[in-house]
């Protein structure tokens, strides 16, 4: 549905986006994960037709933003990072304003406002002035504004930055509902947990380049690190370790009272049973998962969040 090829954009001497290519299928939630300054917003601005690329092409359902500007604009709904609402107008009147910009006929617009307000859970607050809204509620109105013309693709730029956990969950639920209705969603964030929860496929972006892309399990295969469980016992002798090795088929590394077992959480009960058999007392258990944070570190040598 979306094809992006060899897209680049520089600002003065900064290569904000440097020759990136990706495709997104209809109905996918596609995530861009990367630290601040990675090039996520610049990519989204170009996809939103708000910024012209230096090189490369973007097609959505075969249309590009230069040759088919109007058709392209109607295919996409854009949720920008900055709140773009009038504080002294009610939520309803803000949405009327946005709908008029899209030239939605009045009757259709009223229906559309009702549906989107219901979707984002703010129908009962529609007549309140935006200045009385929390940051999270304003973000939800921003999402409603992007949906009024019934787009096929929703482009969301870090929609949960700086908002309370309740609004964040609300936004996740809205995204999941929209996706279940067939909406294709492009989502940028620097929060690993968000892409892990929401996204079918992920592009990891750093310094303007996509350094890896795929499903979560495909990305996990890229790194050498294996999921492991760290046990701490009250006391662990060499003899105990030898006995554990005889009982368990996993690779184990042992230092003092700690034992690192290369296995997944599914095998936890087997390991505990073996420990009990040897009358070993467990002091602490820690599961080291291979998550997107670990993948980012392994690929770039940097933390996702500085
Ligand atoms: P992200 O969204 O991942 O935080 P951005 O796309 O906003 O990253 O920025 C990528 C890089 O491009 C950064 O180094 C940023 O400072 C730079 N940049 C973005 N927009 C502009 C601009 N309008 N003028 C100059 N530099 C910019």
Image: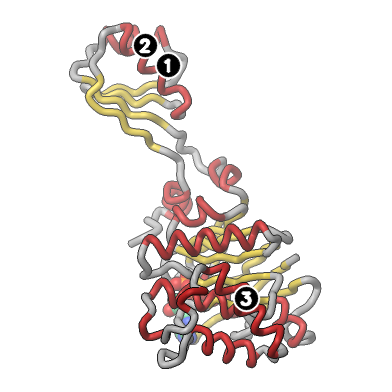
Instruction: Give residue 82's quadrant in the image.
Output: bottom left
**Residue at mark 3:** 147
Which comes sooner in the sequence, label 2 or label 3?
3
Instruction: Give residue 73's quadrant in the image.
Output: bottom right
The residues bearing labels 2 and 3 have C-alpha atoms spaced at a distance of: 56 Å
Residue lying at the far left of the rendered structure: 234
Camera sees residue 135: yes
**Residue at mark 1:** 270
Q: Residues within 10 Å of mark 2 (few under 14, many from 20)?
A: some
In the rendered image of this protein, does residue 84 appear above or below residue 153?
Answer: below
Residue 274 numbered tag: 2
Whether ligand 1 has any atom under 8 Å from the Cβ at mark 3 is answered as: no
Are the two marked residues, 2 and 3, in contact with CB atoms closer than 8 angstroms? no
Q: Residues within 10 Å of mark 3 (few under 14, many from 20)?
A: many
On the picture, is 51 further left or further right than 288?
A: right
Tell which tag, 2 or 3, sits nearer the viewer. 3
């Amino acid at each position: 549905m979306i094809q992006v090829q060899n897209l680049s954009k520089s600002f003065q001497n900064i290569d904000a986006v440097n020759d990136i290519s990706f495709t997104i299928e209809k109905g996918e939630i596609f995530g861009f994960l990367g630290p601040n300054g990675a090039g996520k917003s610049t990519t989204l601005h170009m996809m939103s037709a708000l910024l012209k690329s230096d090189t490369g092409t973007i097609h959505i359902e075969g249309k590009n933003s230069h040759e088919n500007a109007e058709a392209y604009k109607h295919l996409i709904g854009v949720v920008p990072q900055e709140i773009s609402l009038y504080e002294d107008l009610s939520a309803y009147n803000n949405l009327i304003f946005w709908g008029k910009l899209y030239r939605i006929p009045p009757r259709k617009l009223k229906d559309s406002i009702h549906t989107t307000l219901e979707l984002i859970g703010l129908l009962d607050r529609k007549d309140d002035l935006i200045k009385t809204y929390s940051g999270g509620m304003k973000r939800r109105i921003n999402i409603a504004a992007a949906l009024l013309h019934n787009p096929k693709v929703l482009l969301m730029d870090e929609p949960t930055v700086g908002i309370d956990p309740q609004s964040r969950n609300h936004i996740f639920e809205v995204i999941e509902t929209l996706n279940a209705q067939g909406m294709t969603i492009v989502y940028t964030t620097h929060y690993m947990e968000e892409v892990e929860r929401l996204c079918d496929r992920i592009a990891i972006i750093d310094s303007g380049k996509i350094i890896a892309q795929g499903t979560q399990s495909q990305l996990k295969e890229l790194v050498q690190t294996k999921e492991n469980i760290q046990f701490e016992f009250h006391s662990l002798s060499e003899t105990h370790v030898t006995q554990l090795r005889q009982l368990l088929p996993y690779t184990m590394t042992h230092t003092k009272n700690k034992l690192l077992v290369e296995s997944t959480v599914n095998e936890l009960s087997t390991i505990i049973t073996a420990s009990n058999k040897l009358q070993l007392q467990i002091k602490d258990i820690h599961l080291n998962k291979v998550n997107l944070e670990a993948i980012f570190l392994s690929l770039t040598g940097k933390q996702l969040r500085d």
